Image (cartoon, rainbow, N blue to C red):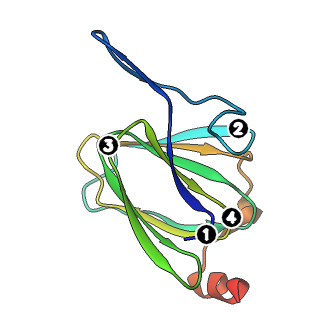
Amino acid sequence: MKGVKLINLPKVSDIRGNLAIVENGSEIPFDIKRVYFLYDIPGGSERGGHAHKNLHQIIIASSGSFDIELDDGVNKETFHLNRPYNGLYLSPMKWRVINNFSSGCVCSVIASEIYREDDYIRDYEEFITKCN
């Protein structure tokens, strides 16, 4: 799917454990303006259910695992994230639903902009109309 890419973040491993690295201007294809976390997600819950007009994001399974169902208005694809050194890059105008969260999962999101409600498309039919 165009505008979606799995990014391997640099990692350092030694006997003390592992370290995954996120740096502005390195593997991240945008300037970082916001980072947030989804956690304590009840079993069976879904998150997302929207698209962004202008926002770029990297989504990471910092702990545990989850699926991201993506839709660009034509193609649909599902990604399973379960490693903190893999980030899924999403360009604008990708409808996303995040589900199948494992117990204790932490979903980290790196965003190109601060929160702006007017950047969201929360109605799927509106999203499809804007894609065409």
Judged by depth in the image, the label closer to the viewer, 1 or 3, is 1
Per the rendering, the mark at residue 92 is 4
Give the alpha-carbon distance from disc 2 to disc 1, as whole Å.
21 Å
Mark 1–mark 4 distance (CA, rounded to whole Å): 11 Å
Where is the C terminus found, in terms of image quarters?
bottom right
Residue type indicated by callout 1? Lys
Amino acid at circle 4: Pro
Q: Earlier in the sequence, mark 3 or mark 2?
A: 2
Classify mark 1: helix, strand or loop.
loop
**Element marked by disc 3:** loop
Query: Residue 86 appears at what percent x and percent y?
Result: 44, 43
In the image, what residue type sits under mark 3? Cys
The residue beneath circle 3 is 105
User: Going by the image, does 87 lie left or right of 117?
Assistant: left
CA gap between label 1 and label 3 equals 28 Å
Image mark for residue 32:
2
Amino acid, disc 2: Ile
Q: Nearer the viewer, mark 3 or mark 2?
A: 2
Q: Eyeballing the image, is 85 above or below 74?
A: above
